[in-house]
Amino acid sequence: MRKPELAAAIADKTGLTREKAGEVISAFTDQVSAAAARGEDVTLIGFGTFNIRSREARSGRNPQTGASIQIPASKTVGFKAGKALKDAIR
């Protein structure tokens, strides 16, 4: 499901216009992104938790040449599904 399809489904369920539902989705993603940039977790009870995960520096291989390369440490966003979401997909 893409963003326009999600906005349409939310609009149908809530009575909002598709444009307003799209604005709500954009506001939600903006706030999750801002919290992640600050290093904060975002928890939606029953749905899941977005959190920051650190990756250590490591060595790897260039798949084209086979040469060894150093991959620097980085941060990424992870998601852990909540119980209600896990139960819904079983």
Image (tube, rainbow, N blue to C red):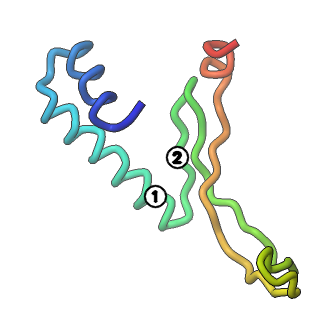
Q: Quadrant of residue 46?
A: top right
Query: Residue, x 57% and y 51% (percent of image)?
Result: 41
- Up/down of 64 relative to 39, above or below: below
Residue with the mark numbered 2? 42
- The quarter of the image holding the C terminus is top right
* Amino acid on which the number 2 mark rests in the picture: Val
Q: Residue 57: which quarter of the image? A: bottom right
86, above or below 70, in the image: above
Disc 2: CA contacts within 10 A as few (<14), some (14-19) or many (>=20): some
- Residue type, numbered disc 1: Ala
Q: Dot 1: within a 10 Å radius of its alpha carbon, few (fewer than 14), some, or many (20 or more) residues?
A: some
> Relative to 56, is 19 above or below?
above
Residue occupying image coordinates x 85% and y 77%? 60
For marks 2 and 1, the one nearer the N-term is 1
x and y percent of residue 47 in the render?
55, 28
Q: Position of residue 76 (x, y in %)?
A: 63, 63
Q: In screen coordinates, is 36 left or right of 57?
A: left
Can you give x and y, in whole percent of width and height, for residue 27 in the image?
Answer: 27, 47
- Locate residue 14 relative to residue 80 in the image: left or right: left
Q: Residue at x 72, y 67 (%)?
A: 54
> Would you say 72 lies left or right of 48 here?
right
For the residue labelled by badge 2, is the local secondary structure a helix, a strand or a loop? strand
Instruction: Identify the element where label 1 is drawn.
Output: helix
The image's mark for residue 35 is 1
Point out which mark residue 64 bears.
none
Please say if the residues under marks 2 and 1 sit with CB atoms less than 8 Å apart: yes
Q: Residue at x 38, y 36 (%)?
A: 2
Measured from the top left, where is residue 56 in percent x and y? Answer: 81, 74
